Amino acid sequence: MTAQIIDGKALAAAMRAELKDTVTKLKTKGITPGLAVILVGQDPASQSYVTAKEKACAEIGIYSDDNRLPAETSEADLLALVKRFNADPKIHGILVQLPLPKHIDEDKVLLAIDPDKDVDGFHPVNVGRMVVGQKGFLPCTPHGVLQMLLRSGVSLEGAEVVIVGRSNIVGKPLANMLIQKSPTGNATVTVCHTRTKHLAEHVQRADIVIAAAGRPGTVTAEMVKAGAVVIDVGVNRVEDATKKNGYRLVGDVDFEAVKEKASLITPVPGGVGPMTITMLLHNTVQSARQAAGLL
Ligand code: NAP
């Protein structure tokens, strides 16, 4: 069996077109969704993420307020800026790009964001809402994975899902979303990590494998059940002398071999990545609708 490729770019484009329609309609009511983007320092990867997020906002008509601050910005100044955006009615979402420089306490900054503007879904209030199944912002990468599964027609009802990775931004929230008692949940989930014994045995059981370990080759063809759905969240740089920049991006899954065994598989790049930014746009639009009493 050769797997069908889940095209993250195409799914993201379809969702962005839907969001653009919603934004156009909101504008006729005098509402423009606004996202404040805050970047501290000059980390090249963070700069390119922030640029991509702002470009995506512009494409669908979201107003973005760009704040690129020097690396030596104090924690107090950053907290004051967050506070200002919390009170600004033009701003419906606040995104603080991580990682922050060492002298700034990330937890303190994330806690300072109004949970109703926390479009990254990292604030403990939103994490709590997610766990108990209340309405709130879902974190973008796991929500993107969930949307990919649903929009590809994958049934979650009673499915055996194995997630490799237990981080706060991917593995843990994804597990929580998939076990919710709801038509978009109802899966049986196993979460694996570096202390898991017999990783292969867990993965072999899975109808759906989700790799979020940050290590190339974590999921091999021998570990995957024939016909499984394989979602690769990992993004890893590996040296490649044939590339101008000296590297290429790969996921955590041995894509070429696993695609011969799986029924559906996501590529890297072009899989989960485009969905992550799309879910940020989704959360910002939801927040604007919520603030306007339209939800
Ligand atoms: P992270 O915080 O480093 O967490 C990695 C998790 O994987 C940890 O729980 C770790 O276990 C587990 N792990 C690592 N190696 C393992 C192995 N060999 N076997 C079993 N478990 C293993 O990483 P993250 O932030 O969740 O990100 C994971 C990957 O997704 C990275 O490649 C990242 O770049 C990518 N990512 C992509 C997007 C996107 O939009 N496409 C967004 C976010 C992240 P321990 O807890 O025991 O250490």
Image (cartoon, rainbow, N blue to C red):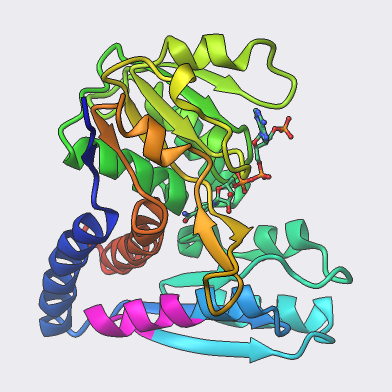
Residue 90 image-quadrant placement: bottom left
Asked if residue 91 shows in the view, the reply is no
Image quarter in which the C terminus is found: bottom left
Q: Is residue 77 left or right of residue 169?
A: right
Looking at this view, is 268 or 196 the one in front?
268
Looking at this view, is 149 or 225 the one in front?
225
In which of the image's four quarters is ligand 1 placed? top right
Q: How many marks?
A: 0
How far across and down, in percent of the image, does residue 41 sit?
73, 83
Above or below 151: residue 257: above
Looking at this view, is 293 or 133 the one in front?
133
Residue 154 image-quadrant placement: top left
**279 part of magenta stretch:** no
Residue at the spot 60% in from the left edge and 82% down from the top edge: 84
How far across and down, in percent of the image, does residue 173 sit?
51, 36
Q: Is residue 256 left or right of residue 50?
A: left
How far across and down, in percent of the image, does residue 278 sit?
32, 62
Above or below 80: residue 206: above
Residues in magenta?
51-63
Residue at the spot 39% in from the left edge and 33% down from the top edge: 257
